[in-house]
Image (cartoon, helix red, strand yellow):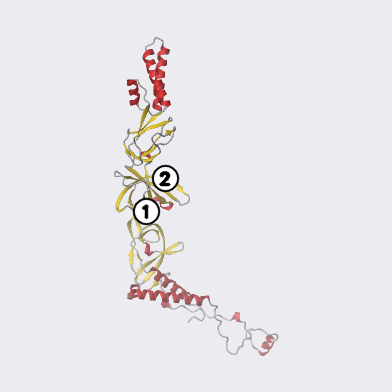
Amino acid sequence: MMIRRSLIGTGIALVLMAGLLIWLLSSPALVPPAESGQGEMAGMEMPGMEQSREGLGVRSEKRENKQKAPPRTPDASRLTPEAGTVTIPPERLQTIGVKYEQVSRRPLEKIIRTVGRVAVDERKLAKVTIKFHGWIEQLFVSATGDHVKKGQQLFTIYSPDLVATQEEYLLALQGRMQLGDSDLPEVARGSKDLLEATRHRLHLWDIGEEHIRALERTKQVSKTLPLHSPISGTVISKNILQGAHVEPGEELYTIADLSRVWVLADIYEYELSFVKVGQQAAVTFSYDPGKVLTGRLNFVYPTLDPKTRTAKVRFELANADEQLKPDMYANVELRANLGTRLAIPQEAIIESGQKQVVFLHLGGGKLEPRLIKTGVKTGEWSEVLAGLKEGEHIVTSANFLIDSESRLKSVVDSMGGMPGMK
């Protein structure tokens, strides 16, 4: 408590002294008092005075020809032998809580924190459509959120076009059996080509090979045919009802495999240089803040949002239990190892416009302000590019009080040669 009161008192005193000195500097200089025997008209030349003075043998001297008094030498106790240094008694430094630290090389790690959003892995997403019009006869998967397996029946559909194509296939199959051994090569080849064309049309309509073989075996046209799921996953969208008429290209289901999901996060433009494909990130969610998942950065998007000045990056996470839902918010922490670099605590740096200043400890209460150039800032550390060497000692606390003392001393020293300043 005593130290805190002493710090506050020292700071207030320094501010008041600096304000008084600045006011004195801004006031017009006082004119020295006139010499005895001269009035207010002492320096003026009156008509006829020159001749009378010469007649009396008195020599006139103009004020500007008088020799000026030499400037006053500043008090030697206020100056230090080294230019730019400031000397503060060690006991005073201890009172205001000055601490020192040695400049050294240390491993730096850049931590980037951002927010993300869970998204479906686009490579594990499928949409179910049809390529012919028809009517839904039976609906086997009827709700959003249902889980399906690859090849599982979704619905059956009746289509006049599909029925007609089955009939054409049976006729082509019968013609192939009758004309396949014809002595005329053109006839045999024509029957074969007609069968293949009809089979190809069924394939284009996504009719499976097993249904075609059943048609060949039974020789009976099916009124309806089933459509199957292309992948295993969860139905996240359903636009189909039993008995409804559907058109070619209409989206009936959207199925997503949620066993692995993406987390899309935004990285600011100035942080992109620290982001590389393959880095690991710690991902947490509000539904269970204590659970930390590990995601791998597998893609940096090639475009930048012009409004937010951010680029999207993509992390991939395992989601076997499907606890992560699409559009959930996530907190992402990415760590970039920068290697070993020369660094100092950020609290040791005084930001002065576009310059960075630190105080170098020379021993015996002597402190030297030093301009430095900084690089990457990581948490409480700042990389030093120029201005300091490994092994030097710098001030890491109470910098602003020392800076105030140094500025006050420079003002006092500059006033030492002014007339009237005793």
Q: Residue 299's spot in the image, x, y percent?
A: 38, 44
Residue at the image position 38 percent from the left and 74 percent from the top: 8
Mark 1 nearby-residue class (10 Å; few <14, some 14–19, many ≥20)? some
Residue that numbered label 1 is attached to: 112
Q: Residue 46's spot in the image, x, y percent?
A: 68, 85
Q: Secondary structure at mark 2?
A: strand
**Foreground residue among 238 and 337:** 238
The mark nearer the N terminus, 1 or 2, is: 1
Left or right side of 25 for 147: left
Asked where in the image residue 124 lies, by quadrant, the reply is top left
Q: Can you say whether 84 is above or below 283 in the image?
A: below
Is residue 147 visible from the viewing direction of this image? Answer: yes
Left or right side of 69 for 151: left
Residue that numbered label 2 is attached to: 301
Farthest front residue in view? 243
Which amino acid does the dot numbered 2 rest on? Tyr
**Foreground residue among 406 and 143:** 143
Q: Can you say whether 373 is above or below 120 in the image?
A: below
Left or right side of 76 for 291: left
**Foreground residue among 241 and 24:** 241
Left or right side of 63 for 17: left
Q: CA distance from mark 1 to mark 2?
A: 17 Å
Q: Can you say whether 123 is above or below 215 in the image?
A: below
Query: Which quadrant holds the N terminus?
Result: bottom left
Q: Secondary structure at mark 1?
A: strand
Which amino acid does the dot numbered 1 rest on? Ile
Asked where in the image residue 10 lies, by quadrant, the reply is bottom left
Is residue 275 visible from the viewing direction of this image? Answer: no
Q: Residue 101's spot in the image, x, y percent?
A: 33, 65
Residue at the image position 33 percent from the left and 68 percent from the top: 99
